[in-house]
Amino acid sequence: MIGWLSLVLTLLAQAPDRTTPAQQVLELQRQLDRSRTSAERSAIIESLEKIRTSSAPEADRILARYSQGRAYLALADYENAGTAFSEVAAYRHASGDRFGEALALHNQAAALWSAGEPGRALKIYDEILPIRQTLRDDAGVAYTQYGIAAAHYSMGQPAIALEAYRAAAGIWTRLKDNRGLAGTLNSVGLIYVQLGDAKRAEIELQRSLTLFRSLKDGSGEAYALNNLGLAALSSRDYDRALEFFTKALPMLQTARDRRGESYALHNLGSAHQGLGRDKQAANYFETALARKRESEDRWGEATSLQALGEISGSRHYFEEALAIRRSVADRAGLITTLASLARLDLRAGRVREAKNEIVEAIQLVETTRDRLVSEDLRATWFSSQRDLYDLYIETLIRSGETEQAFAIAESARGRLLADRLRDISTGMRGSAPAALIAQQQMLIRRINAKADQLHRLYSGPRPEAGTALPERELRLLWEQQKDLREAMRRASPQYRALVEPDLTAYQIRRLLDRDSLLIAIFPGAEATHAWTATRDNVRYHRLPVNAKHQFAASEGASLSPLAAEIRRLKPHRLILAVEGDLEATSFAAIHLPGDSEPLAARYSLVFLPSAAGLALNRSIRRLKSGGIVALVDPVYGAPDSRLPAGSGGPAQYPRLRFSSAEGQAIAGLSPNARILSGFEANRSFLQQQSKAAAILHLAAHTELNRQEPRLSSVVLSQFDSGGKPVDGLLRLHEIYSLELSAKLVVLSACRSTDGPWLRGEGLMGITRGFLHAGAVSVLATVRDVEDRAAAEMVARFYAALLDRKLQPDKALQWAQNSMRTDPAWSTKDVWSAFALYGDWR
């Protein structure tokens, strides 16, 4: 433990000979470090007790008591360990030894944490921290932050745990203590693994591994390799995980680390299980369980019992694991085991028991998500737990609670969008301190500069050369930006009052108009769940697992329940609550079974990313004034007659000549519209003009960055009027930061809905970015569209919107049918390329 050896050596230096009680304590401590069995450790405690109750000097007796505490910790006798450290702390306090007091209190807190009492441990760590800060014991402060992190994580507060770990990492960096830094980064990586963010976890763990290797610390290296294996497991890269665990196991065996060995054995079992080798997996789990019981590792024992239950389907394994996890307050473990029991009970027809178990698990998931400040962590954590909602919905359906299942399905979609809109509705977005806003602006500039460097490298003759360092630097800037966003949320006076109300089925229905039909599709493991909802009722439809693919292709009789319901109700508007590839499907062109005309012929269509987001958006007070701002026909480079002779580099994007017609059509319908064309269609003007716009129109290219999706962008003018290059990329991370009051954003660009898909959140591309920025609705494209066709479609859309005074969805339907029935534009790829996302009003 911290400082223990220095205390002993100080006493020895004062001793006249080498046979003092302090020397005996040191020898017993060495024996304790080498001990492997409970019997050996118990014998050491007895020997220490003889010194403690002898006539030795009081300082030596207290040292013996401290060592007893360590021995009790090794025996997992946390109650006696805590008592011993408490007595030592009281003595050190009375004698004025603040350093020794903090040391004893630290170990008392560690004993409480190990005993499953993180709350009590945290109180002691909070008491220690100012003592060590006053003493300027930087290493002690770092270790205390480490303990604070462990306590918060055990209490289901991983975001606060990460803050504490980062504080510790900062101290180790300042002290140039690579060993401490390596251990801290290893713990940070493990938290990210457990939160489902494998990519971010690997960044931290690779840094940890590099440091451990530079220190020639085989044990630390083995743990980093093990945790990298866990990151690969969470990404279902089982072969890669197997490589990491296979490297870690012999290193832990060489170090005679029985606990670490047991975890590597268990993880090898998980990798084999992922590869379908259940017999090999079970053997590894059994061996790991035996090792964990030998070392009295209760947390680890529960993990191996859980794994054996998954392979065998035997309830008694799960029940044993559940009892242990409750006793040690393992929240993440409880979620896993409760879900396993619920699946087992559901298969056996014990629906009521399954519902009780899954409800408890869901409550734990929601509580954990609510405590995460970081939007990225909230999204990845919730996405990693999405299967629980599938199980919950299946359980509710089996128990006949179809309306409640509908409400749960809707609450599990688009949560991050609802969070963003809640920030806007509470005024939280603009209430951060000026210093933090300045830091944010500086970080955005640095990120964009680094992104521009990478863009040039990716576009060069050898894109694989020279990108490693700037990619790593960009990742670090992303981390700084995420940390800053968390700090800004915490600094907001509205943050602590922020709550997440779940909408009931009734509340969702009241969002609908009389002429609307909501179609919600939730893909599950056993079936595709679908609901049709009107303002008055909700109906459930059970479809085959592959129904969502059939829906997109308009195939098969599986769609007949939905088709029959649509025909029976005769709505004017279809609201689509879907996810994944269905979000970028051209529903307007789909034919229901038996229909000769597409859906657009009879119905207007709207994609609804989030019911909660819709309710929040309607609660936000919008600007009453504000017209149309349109950016069209940007300048991308030579050849372009608008550039001064001899200036401007070659264009990387083709000119959108016909997009100027979009601006002309808008100006003809709305004389007060602000049309920014050519050089004026630039990033700076957009950022300045977007806040006040009621309608924001962008006719430009978009670029999907597959290496780093956050750098996907709207491509605006690349040169100024003097022919000098300018940054024309409005990147996705900047779009998210726009403060829009727009009722409508029109993205007249190819594939503007495209982006990476995150379970439970949807396609996280440019379209979603504008919704997150506060736009009520976004008109976007689901496929490539030629600029002349886009100009024609946009002109007809605005004619319906501004001249005919139709709502956006009806204006889109009118334009689609106008194009569809016009022989010059009747090709499906032309008239069905646009779709509306968000609120139809």
Image: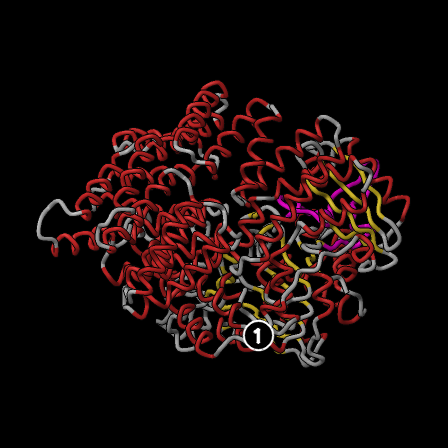
Give amino acid for label 1: Pro
Foreground of the two, 426 or 493: 493
**Residue that appears at 44% across and 34% down:** 237
- Horizontal relation, residue 488 to residue 465: left or right: right
Q: Is residue 572 placed above or below 759 in the rendered structure?
A: below
User: How many numbered marks, from 0 up?
Assistant: 1
Foreground of the two, 786 or 358: 358
Residue located beneath label 1 in the image: 493
- Horizontal relation, residue 781 to residue 728: left or right: right
Where is the C terminus found, in terms of image quarters?
Answer: bottom right
Mark 1 packing: few (<14 Cα in 10 Å), some, or many (20+)? some
Foreground of the two, 369 or 686: 369
**Residue that appears at 50% across and 50% down:** 117
- Horizontal relation, residue 515 to residue 149: left or right: right
**Residue that appears at 62% across and 78% down:** 692
- Horizontal relation, residue 727 to residue 674: left or right: left
Q: Is residue 337 placed above or below 210 in the rendered structure?
A: above
Question: Start and end of the magenta stretch?
Answer: 577-606
Q: Residue 305 at x, y = what percent?
A: 52, 29
Q: Residue 285 at x, y = what percent?
A: 46, 25
Task: Give the residue at the far right of this rendering.
Answer: 568
Q: Residue 26 at x, y = what percent?
A: 20, 44
Tell me if residue 62 can be seen: yes
SS for callout 1: loop
